[in-house]
Image: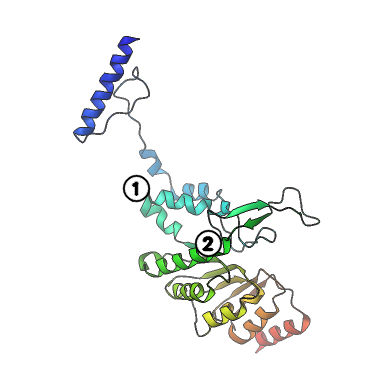
Amino acid sequence: MPPKKRARKETAAKEAASEAQGETPTIVSSVEEAPELKVNFGVIFDLPVELWLEILSYFPSVRIPTKRIGHAPLLPASTLARQLSLRALSQTCRAFRTQFLPELWDRFEVCATLNQIEEPLRHRPPGSRPDDERFDLAGAWYKDISRALETKSNGLRESPELAKLVHKVSVALTRCSAPTVLGAFVQCLHALPNLHTLQVLRAHSQMTTHLKNAFQGHKFPAIQVVVLPDHAHNVLRSCPEARTVICNGSDGGKLISAIAKECKKVQRLEGFHANEALMKRLLSNFME
């Protein structure tokens, strides 16, 4: 036993001396292991990008289009897993930053927060499966999501080198500080030169006026795909070059009116349950 204690002290002294001289000490799991043991981590950098993306595809993420779980206003915090993993990888070293930063900023997402309080749904809707992941949100989640959208919008607008990497945007909108938050978000959209897909997963049904005031007079001609609820039709009016429109809330009647007036190039519709009169109006618009 005494010799082992002396060996540990000698090893610790050598490591301390190496660190003081700016050297990297050799890491061994026990005193008995050979001091010349080396671990080669270089193989990680040799993995092809396709394999990394395949691995990351198994992490929860925000799909386009995606459906909210039950009636919850936000997606679960677990959907942040992919973005958090990409952020960690991009901050590991210079090689990983070059490889993963474009993938990280390909999507600008504000659909959930890490600190949101999720509670199991007390009364399960009739006909739902037992394994359905349904939950309620507790606390001031609407303040957190609004604050996150404003902060990230302002930050991205002031970072043109990152803004040019963004191709897809997915957000949840609330009435909390709506004029300020929506104003920042609209200016952020103007700063994204390569944006082609805009998804609004959630917008309060009483936000119509706020959305009209924020988006009126603004045009985003680069956007080709728009996913949004019916009462967010004023957002669609600002996307005159949209080719695909997906309704993720209500029947889509107001979206059809917006398409007939402002979006003459729409070629594909999904999620619509409008009445016959509005559908005829839409068809007549296409035949002009």
In space, the residues marked 1 and 2 are separated at their CA atoms by 31 Å
Relative to residue 48, is residue 39 depicted above or below? above
Q: Which of 199 and 20 is in front in this view?
A: 20
Residue visible at 50% across and 71% down? 196
Give neighbour class at mark 2: few <14, some 14-19, many 20+ (Cα, 10 Å). some
Quarter of the image containing the C terminus? Answer: bottom right
208 lies above or below 79? below
Q: In which quarter of the image is residue 200?
A: bottom right
Marks 1, 2: nearer the viewer: 2
Q: Earlier in the sequence, mark 1 or mark 2?
A: 1
Q: Nearer the viewer, residue 164 or 5?
A: 5
In this view, 7 is above or below 193? above
**Colour theme:** rainbow
Give the position of the N terminus as an image quadrant. Answer: top left
Q: Position of residue 238 (x, y in %)?
A: 54, 80
State the SS at label 2.
helix
Q: Position of residue 21 (x, y in %)?
A: 18, 33
User: Where does label 1 land, which residue?
Assistant: 93
Figure quadrant of residue 188: bottom left
Say the numbered circle drawn on residue 16: none
Badges 1 and 2: C-beta atoms under 8 Å apart? no
Quick one: which residue is furthest to the left in this view? Answer: 21
Left or right, 107 with reference to 40:
right
Residue at (51% x, 49% y) in the render: 56
Q: Residue 106: image x %, image y %?
A: 46, 61
Question: Which residue is drawn at the image coordinates 69% and 83% (left, top)?
Answer: 282
Q: What element carries label 1?
A: loop
The amino acid type, in three-letter code, at marker 1 is Cys
Q: Mark 2 points at which residue?
A: 144
Q: In which quarter of the image is residue 112?
A: bottom right
Lateral position of residue 193 relative to residue 38, left or right: right
